[in-house]
Amino acid sequence: MDLVALLPLLIILGAFMFFASRRQKKAMQKTIDLHNSLKVGDRVHTTSGLQGEIKAITDDNVELEIAPGVVTTWMKLAVRDRVVPEDEFDDDIDDAGEPESTGTEITDRPDQNRLN
């Protein structure tokens, strides 16, 4: 095959590799920033799905209270993300203090609960 014919394929492959590595670097930096910003009192999820409150932090470990009086030690790398407090979801409540309509309300009449 001719080198000129391979050139567009090589350019596309190179661009794909560049953007894939850039995306991976951004994700890694986001994880590093999260781990550096952790503080005592934060609620977090671990990579295994456990949720707990940070009670102590060292360079490599965090102590999580997973139930009242139950504190476990985890590698800091096991922290996946910070749990968003419920009061930050107040945007879903309208001025009357009622949750906004989702369009999937259930009525008292069974015949109106069917999808058409």
Image: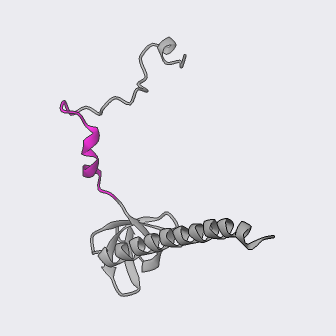
Residue that appears at 61% across and 69% down: 11
Relative depth, front residue between 56 and 88:
88
* Residue 96 is one of the magenta-drawn residues: yes
| Residue 16, position as x, y percentages in the image | 58, 66
Up-down relation of residue 12 to residue 85 (above or below): below
Relative depth, front residue between 28 and 89:
28
- Tell me where the magenta segment starts and ends, as one range: 84-97
106 on left or right of 96: right
The N terminus, quarter of image: bottom right
The C terminus, quarter of image: top right
36 on left or right of 7: left
Q: Residue furthest right?
A: 1
1 on left or right of 43: right
Residue that appears at 42% across and 16% down: 108
Q: On the image, which quarter does residue 93 sit in?
A: top left
| Residue 41, position as x, y percentages in the image | 27, 70
| Residue 99, position as x, y percentages in the image | 29, 34
Up-down relation of residue 89 to residue 1 (above or below): above
| Residue 42, position as x, y percentages in the image | 30, 68
Relative depth, front residue between 52 and 29:
29
